[in-house]
Image (cartoon, grey):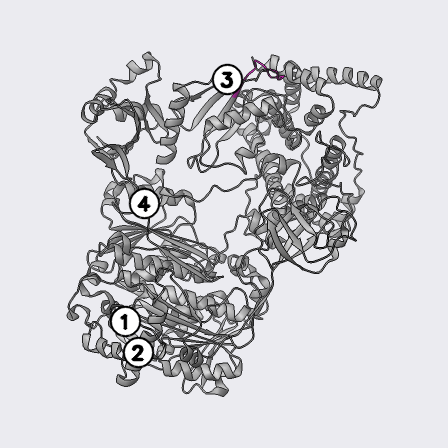
């Protein structure tokens, strides 16, 4: 018996039609092709406790075709430990599937949600492409797997038992993985290719070759040895970091001359999966999830079977912390160990498993649910490598270390019973009364709020969660930020999320803010605020805010939970006061920017032309308009312009003239302007460049100037019937019209006619002639000198400036006039911004024979869109929640874990955090980042310097507060004498030119100093100066 | 913030303690993140004896991001735009947190010593540099005489 709930909107949508706006961030990871397959996949989820609902949530958000919910059991109070869609009033009354279906339907109107009740027969199961089991008995797992394996249905079974878990995949005997790692194909610029039996490819020294033996490549745009361009994918052998050979004889090919790229061709991989029965029987296909626990997969292979055998016998899993039950489990394990020829049974580990078997915490459901949901998407699309085949996880480091009595772990009839069974009542009580600051309620923030409310964090009398986020909700958020619904769009994220999560657990004490964290909000998130906290949880999307919060955590000595995701990649870091290093202790290598000469003259990749188009957009539609508006409204504008050099001044004035005097009066003139811009960018500028550097020019070293990374451009002749040219004119004309508040017309005939009819002046390159005869050279030189002299003449440029200025209307004559400056907005499909950047970039790419990019790709690069998946997000939120349990048990350093993972490979890495490094000042004095000097009471600069000299034997040579330099031994005597008697807080106010807020009670100083005894420069901690 | 301030304190101290002969550097006003430097044109170059003023804007996350650099003295050079911006791989692709402001100034000096016409910003000047060195030298010298006093 099945009951289908229609999408809430009542709109029947074609599953094949992909809503780019909703799925945009996910699409950058999965691609449209994979998304098509996902949207035609029907999934059955069996088991709807915390793990099941996490999987359901993630795959519904990801947008599969349909999800059928199956769980006929009645809701129990302890289900509420992690099932965020159950409520108190459903306990003992509703079937699990009925209790949560409404809320699942609300998650994504494109996904058809239904429920099933009664038998799961072979006939019934045949309609699904994927079936997922969550926390089912081993008997059910085996029975359903057999049906699935026989019928070619992809089968996934996941289970969490306290802090232990397992995921099993069976995708059939012939499963094709189309992308095994999620990375973009590697591509290299060719330097040369040899003519021999197995041709050797030399790439330019820009980048080392990261390909491996056996990888495949194709060639394109090769000159000379053009035969390469037509070869099928070539298997390679790597010779050196810059060379590799291909398996084709190139002796008969034409010699290589120039250009060309070699690009990796990703090879699909076919996997063969065994049934669950066979896998368990042979004990094969174990996947390692933690390299430091290399014995655990085998131990847990027997351990999980043992607790299942216990369950089969007693109709219940072993009781929490019950030693009798654990003994029985161990007996079974010993028998199984013999079968697998495992020498030693790890009693402690398997006892912990037995103790944990009934445990249920949302942290684990988030980790394992997120991971399992990604396996569902892999099964549906063949995108990314699945777990092959059986993975065990454990997070025993988070378990209580002391030998607590069994009574600690007994259920008390509360919604947190599942968690009490793992951690005990004492820790549960502690968690409920914690005060946390959650910074951000975006993707990670929503998951964390769900985790907090299920864990009970902030739900006790003394507990409180503060959440802040300055953003409002956008459509593309709904794909991951599951606390938000379409009707919440444009509402504040923090408030909406707080309200939504209050429904999940009404006991949650939560306050929401929309004030961004940073220097400017220091009065609000002040010392009293931070002192009230037990910990900080970052849920941020930018490094700057992360660094700021890290600074706050270190300053106030509070624990910090940090995490981030990038597509299928995720990481977590836990920062513990006086123990670990902090977030800013180690940093990623700096982001590479594109050198300006490459942007201006020598692009060789689509990223370069997109950046150029983005800069051009900013220049002609925003900065120019801003200059004009400043000229019109800011009386000091011309004066400030005078401080610039004469060239810049003249350029700015000319721009203002062009925008103000030569302004368009109707849309047609905007089209004409767009047509002339086309000529300037894609013909004239290129002609000029080629005039200065002809295609056959040689460098002083005798190699062609246009070679290697420098690609020779070709001018483009305008052709209105070329879609790309037309698109450019339309987008540029529309933006121009917007600048001037003119009405744009969507009339292709008018646009075509206007753009074709306009007379475009012929272009003659600016002269700096290449001389052939001596006489010509002399003539040219004279001419040039005159030219330069006039260039040189500052007065001439000034005169020119005055002349332009005199042509400008006075601001008073234009009172009230304003040009609409355009701020780049990537997410509005009707505003022509991305259209302009796509066309402008692709035309320039065409100039340089660079492969063009479609609108979607251009938007991703120009908008710096960070690809994101709900699955990865859920996982990192779960992992960092497990660290939270450790912090509030005061665990030693070696029990914490930072995680690095990539679900595409898949790869999981867990490492112990790095201890806070010790800096030595003297033999008897070393310090870490958690130390500081505490200076209490207002002092003058003189008193401060003396204090350090007398008390610490340090002579201060420089003293700064934020960016302000308060004192340095190099300042002149007069300034020094002025500053020495000043109170430090006043000195800071004076020099920073900012009054200190009234309730500000401390400043942070950094010093450079010398040991007065040894005269060595020494590195010392910062100073907390309280006044 | 703490990292960058400490680094900058050290860097400016080092430069002031042992000032190089060919450049000066100082903090503008009392802001550690705004520097003004002067590079003296290298001998045997058309920029010889010129004093070239450069403004450095140092980002909050320095040294993880490079300083932004701009010539305030007008200069005739293939790699320096008329508005004073410089094209240098050191300040973009090859930046590393190990590098210091002093290294940046050294690179600028080398660029004055040996312009790189193969990756020009000002293509016309680059072309002249390649094809008519005398005319280039003359123009560069005149600019130097006029602006880089």
Q: Chain of mark 3?
A: B
Q: Which residue is mark 2?
A: A306
Q: Is residue B49 magenta?
A: yes
Which element is circle 1 on? helix
Question: Distance of mark 2 from mark 3, alpha carbons?
Answer: 77 Å
For the stretch drawn in magenta, the main secondary structure is loop
Question: Does label 3 lie on the same chain as label 2?
Answer: no
Mark pair 4, 3: CA separation: 40 Å
On what subunit does the disc labeled 2 rest?
A
Residue A852 visible in rendering: no
Between residue A804 and residue A197, name the one nearer to us: A197
Residue A509 occupies quadrant: bottom left
Q: Reading the chain from its start, which is encountered first: label 1 or label 2?
A: 2
Locate residue A183 relative to residue A682 in the image: left or right. Answer: left
Neighbour class for label 4 at 10 Å: few (<14), some, many (≥20)?
many
- Residue range in magenta is B44-53
Alpha carbon separation for disc pair 1 and 4: 33 Å
Which residue is depicted at the point 25% across and 54% down? A887
- Which element type, helix, strand or loop, lies under badge 2? helix
Residue A581's tag is 4
> In the shown orientation, is residue A243 left or right of residue A671?
left
């Amino acid at each position: 018996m099945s009951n289908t709930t229609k999408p809430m909107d009542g709109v029947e949508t074609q599953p094949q039609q992909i809503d780019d706006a909703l799925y945009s961030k996910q699409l950058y990871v999965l691609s449209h092709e994979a998304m098509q397959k996902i949207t035609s996949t029907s999934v059955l989820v069996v088991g709807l406790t915390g793990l099941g609902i996490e999987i359901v949530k993630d795959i519904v958000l990801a947008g599969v075709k349909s999800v059928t919910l199956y769980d006929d059991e009645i809701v129990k109070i302890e289900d509420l430990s992690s099932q965020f869609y159950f409520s108190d009033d459903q306990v003992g009354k509703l079937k699990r599937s009925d209790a949560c279906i409404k809320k699942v339907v609300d998650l994504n109107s494109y996904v058809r949600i239904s429920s099933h009740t009664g038998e799961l027969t072979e006939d019934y199961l045949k309609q699904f492409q994927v079936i997922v089991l969550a926390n089912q008995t081993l008997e059910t797992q085996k029975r359903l797997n057999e049906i699935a394996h026989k019928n070619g249905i992809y089968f996934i079974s996941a289970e969490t038992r306290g802090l232990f878990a397992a995921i099993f995949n069976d995708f059939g005997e012939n499963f094709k993985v189309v992308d095994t790692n999620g990375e973009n194909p590697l591509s290299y610029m060719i330097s040369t290719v040899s003519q021999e039996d197995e041709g050797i490819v030399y790439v330019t020294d820009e980048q080392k070759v990261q390909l491996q033996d056996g990888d495949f490549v194709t060639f394109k745009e090769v000159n000379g040895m053009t035969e390469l361009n037509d070869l099928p994918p070539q298997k390679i052998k790597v010779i050196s970091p810059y060379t590799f050979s291909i398996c084709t004889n190139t002796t008969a090919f034409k010699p290589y001359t120039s250009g060309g790229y070699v690009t990796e061709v990703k090879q699909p991989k076919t996997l063969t999966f065994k049934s669950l029965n066979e896998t368990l029987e042979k004990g094969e296909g174990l996947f390692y999830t933690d390299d430091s626990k290399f014995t655990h997969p085998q131990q847990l292979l027997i351990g999980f079977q043992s607790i299942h055998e216990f369950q089969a016998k007693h109709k219940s899993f072993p009781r929490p912390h019950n030693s009798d039950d654990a003994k029985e489990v161990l007996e079974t394990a010993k028998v199984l160990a013999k079968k697998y020829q495992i020498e030693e049974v790890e009693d402690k580990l398997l006892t912990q498993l037995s103790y944990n078997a009934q445990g249920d915490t949302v942290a684990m459901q988030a980790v394992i649910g997120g991971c399992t949901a990604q396996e569902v998407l892999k099964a549906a699309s063949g995108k990314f490598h699945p777990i092959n085949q059986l993975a065990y996880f454990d997070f025993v480091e988070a378990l209580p270390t002391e030998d607590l009595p069994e009574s600690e772990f007994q259920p008390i009839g509360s919604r947190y019973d599942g968690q009490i069974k793992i951690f005990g009542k004492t820790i549960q009580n502690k968690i409920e009364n914690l005060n946390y600051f959650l910074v951000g309620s975006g993707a990670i923030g929503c998951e964390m709020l769900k985790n907090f409310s299920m864990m009970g964090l902030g739900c006790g009398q003394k507990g409180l969660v503060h959440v802040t986020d300055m953003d409002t909700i956008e459509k593309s958020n709904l794909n991951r930020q599951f606390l938000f619904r379409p009707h919440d769009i444009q509402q504040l994220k923090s408030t909406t999320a707080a309200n939504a999560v209050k429904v999940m657990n009404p006991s949650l004490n939560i306050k929401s803010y929309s004030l961004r964290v940073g220097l400017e909000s220091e009065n609000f998130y002040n010392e009293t605020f931070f002192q009230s906290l037990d910990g900080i949880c970052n849920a941020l999307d930018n490094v700057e805010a992360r660094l700021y919060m890290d600074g706050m955590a270190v300053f106030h000595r509070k624990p910090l939970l940090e995490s981030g995701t990038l597509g299928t990649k995720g990481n977590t870091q836990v920062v513990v006061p006086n123990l670990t290093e902090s977030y800013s202790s180690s940093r990623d290598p700096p982001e590479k920017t594109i050198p300006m000469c490459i942007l201006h003259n020598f692009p060789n990749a689509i990223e370069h032309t997109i950046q150029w188009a983005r800069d051009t957009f900013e220049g002609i539609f925003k900065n120019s308009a801003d200059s004009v508006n400043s000229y019109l409204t800011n009386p000091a504008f011309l004066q400030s312009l005078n401080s610039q050099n004469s060239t810049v001044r003249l350029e700015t004035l000319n721009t203002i003239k062009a925008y103000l005097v030569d302004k368009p009066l109707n849309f047609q003139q905007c089209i004409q302007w767009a047509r002339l811009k086309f000529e300037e960018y894609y013909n004239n500028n290129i002609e000029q460049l080629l005039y200065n550097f002809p295609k056959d020019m040689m460098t002083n070293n005798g190699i062609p100037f246009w070679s290697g990374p420098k690609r020779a451009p070709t001018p483009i002749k305008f052709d209105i019937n070329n879609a790309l040219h037309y698109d450019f004119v339309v987008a540029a004309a529309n933006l121009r019209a917007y600048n001037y508040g003119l009405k744009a017309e969507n009339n292709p005939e008018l646009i075509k006619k206007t753009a074709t009819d306009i007379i475009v002046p012929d272009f003659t390159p600016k002269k700096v002639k290449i001389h052939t005869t001596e006489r010509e050279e002399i003539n040219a030189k004279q001419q040039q000198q005159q030219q330069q002299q006039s260039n040189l003449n500052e007065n001439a440029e000034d005169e020119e400036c005055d002349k332009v200025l005199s042509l400008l209307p006075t601001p008073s004559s234009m009172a009230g006039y304003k040009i609409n400056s355009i701020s780049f907005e990537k997410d509005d499909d009707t505003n022509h911004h991305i259209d302009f950047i796509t066309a402008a970039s692709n035309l320039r790419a065409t100039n340089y024979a660079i492969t063009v990019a479609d609108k979607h790709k251009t938007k991703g690069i120009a908008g710096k869109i960070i690809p994101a998946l709900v699955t990865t997000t859920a996982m990192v939120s779960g992992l960092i929640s497990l660290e939270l349990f450790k912090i509030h048990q005061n665990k030693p350093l070696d029990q914490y874990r930072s995680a690095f993972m990539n679900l595409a490979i898949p790869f999981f890495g867990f490492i112990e955090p790095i201890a806070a490094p010790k800096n030595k000042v003297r033999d008897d004095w070393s310090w870490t980042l958690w130390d500081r000097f505490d200076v209490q009471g207002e002092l003058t600069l003189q008193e401060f310097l003396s204090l350090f000299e007398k008390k610490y034997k340090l002579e201060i040579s420089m003293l700064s507060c934020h960016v302000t330099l308060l004192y340095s031994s190099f300042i002149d005597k007069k300034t020094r004498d002025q500053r020495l008697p000043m109170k430090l807080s006043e000195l800071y106010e004076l020099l920073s030119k900012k009054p200190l807020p009234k309730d500000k009670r401390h400043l942070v100083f950094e010093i450079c100093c010398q040991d007065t005894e040894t005269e060595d420069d020494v590195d010392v901690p910062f100073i907390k100066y309280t006044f | 913030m703490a990292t960058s301030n400490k680094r900058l304190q050290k860097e400016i101290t080092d430069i002031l303690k042992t000032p190089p002969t060919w450049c000066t550097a100082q903090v503008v006003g009392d802001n550690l993140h705004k520097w003004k430097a002067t590079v003296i044109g290298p001998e045997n170059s058309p920029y010889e004896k010129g004093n070239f003023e450069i403004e450095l804007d140092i980002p909050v996350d320095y040294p993880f991001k490079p300083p932004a650099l701009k010539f305030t003295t007008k200069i005739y050079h293939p790699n320096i735009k008329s508005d004073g911006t410089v094209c240098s791989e050191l300040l973009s692709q090859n930046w590393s947190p190990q590098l210091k402001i002093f290294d940046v100034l050294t690179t600028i000096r080398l660029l004055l010593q040996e312009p790189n016409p193969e990756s020009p910003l000002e293509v016309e000047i680059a072309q002249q540099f390649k094809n008519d060195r005398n005319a280039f030298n003359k123009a560069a010298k005149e600019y130097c005489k006029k602006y880089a006093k």
